[in-house]
Amino acid sequence: MDWGVRMKNAELDLYTDYLLSSFGSATATGLSQMVQGAVSHDKVTRFLSGRDYTSKDLWMQVKAVVRQVEDETGVLIFDDTIQEKVWTDESDLICWHYDHCVGRTVKGINLLNALYHCKGRSVPVAFELVQKPLQCDLATREVKRKSEMTKNEMMREMIRVCLQNALKFRFVLMDSWFSSEENFEFITGHGKDFIAALKDNRLVALSLEDRQAKRFVRIDKLEFPEQTAVQGWLKGSARAVRLVRQVFKNQDGSTGTLHLVCSDITCDHDTITTSYKKRWQVEVFHKSLKSNAGMAKSPTQTLRTQSNHVFMAIVAVFKLECLSVKAKLNPFALRLKLLINATRSAYNQLTQFQVAAA
């Protein structure tokens, strides 16, 4: 399998290389200096502001690799992440979003990703940036920022595009934030299955009789046999599903519980839990975006250039993943190796300066 990355755009190739090679702030001047002026500061700025790079452009970059690795056992993972930008001026892109991980609103960039995982490899196949333009509420005349699409609507559109691109996958994986009945109906209505986390207060019935009598109970109040998937029904749905409860120990010694739902009623406990573990790959992807590709370090301040910088960071992480396969190192180890080499080079040059000054 050839995991070599060949960009279709020389400037894109150079910019993503710069993001992976630099360990401080990303600037147009810094990129120009890296190539000793072969590319000017102005040319970098023109590249970032030339046009909007979208999810369609990402698919064109990753399609060849996806076709090499994909099969019907693949999973399509959805999750969003927020890159905080506390000190940056507010805009349609950099604004306030609710972060369910910390339980409060934060100021920053909200990015929704679709990550394809198959045969141990992860490839970003679609993304959307949540923008919140100023809108006036006609009833209250209050002006506030509001997205024109919800993240759930964005996710459904991304799934539709992935299906249009003939992407092969078995399950859509998502956390409880995306576990709405509308999403479930959309996925199964398009001939695919899902595995999702459920909130503890989700109402379910474990028998057809209870469902018909509308005797629904919070899932965290039900007795579950261990290591077993049970058949049940979610309130508001006529579809039978498989339900799983996982009990685990947190790092602080406390006990945690995770409830999973799967639309494929032929799946057993191990299939459901093993498949859902792959959802962690999107967390790794988000960590790589922030620590390996400088997602937060946009060198410019306009909406288009900031959005394009995020696109470049996504492509850079994809490139790093491909390089890590060829180098047989995980992406973080490969990036650390670049840092060590850069530090060693700087130290050697510093030593030369000290000798010359002696």
Image (spheres, helix red, strand yellow):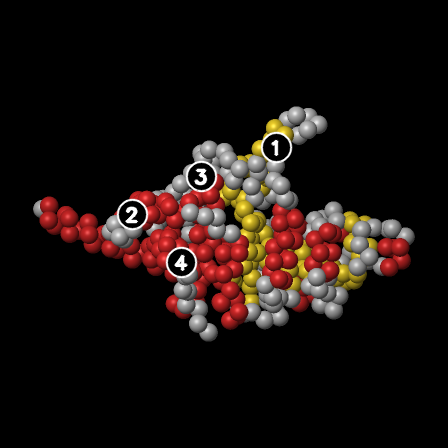
Q: 57 above or below 145? A: below
- Whether the residues at callouts 3 and 1 have beta carbons within 8 Å, the answer is no
The kind of residue on which mark 2 rests is Ser
Q: Secondary structure at mark 3?
A: loop
Is any part of residue 335 visible from this angle? no
Q: Secondary structure at mark 4?
A: loop
Q: Secondary structure at mark 2?
A: loop
Q: Which residue, given by chain and number where applicable, does mark 3 sit on?
A: 302
The kind of residue on which mark 4 rests is Asn
Tell me the residue at 12%/50% (across/down): 355
Mark drawn on residue 297: none
Disc 4 to disc 2, C-alpha distance: 17 Å
Mark drawn on residue 9: 4
Tell me the residue at 67%/59% (across/down): 195
Mark 2 residue crowding within 10 angstroms, few (<14) / some (14–19) / many (20+): some
The kind of residue on which mark 3 rests is Thr
Is any part of residue 239 visible from this angle? yes
Disc 2 to disc 1, C-alpha distance: 39 Å
Q: Nearer the viewer, residue 251 or 341?
A: 341
Tell me the residue at 58%/41% (across/down): 99
Q: Which residue, given by chain and number where applicable, does mark 2 sit on?
A: 40
The kind of residue on which mark 1 rests is Gln
Earlier-in-chain disc, 3 versus 4:
4
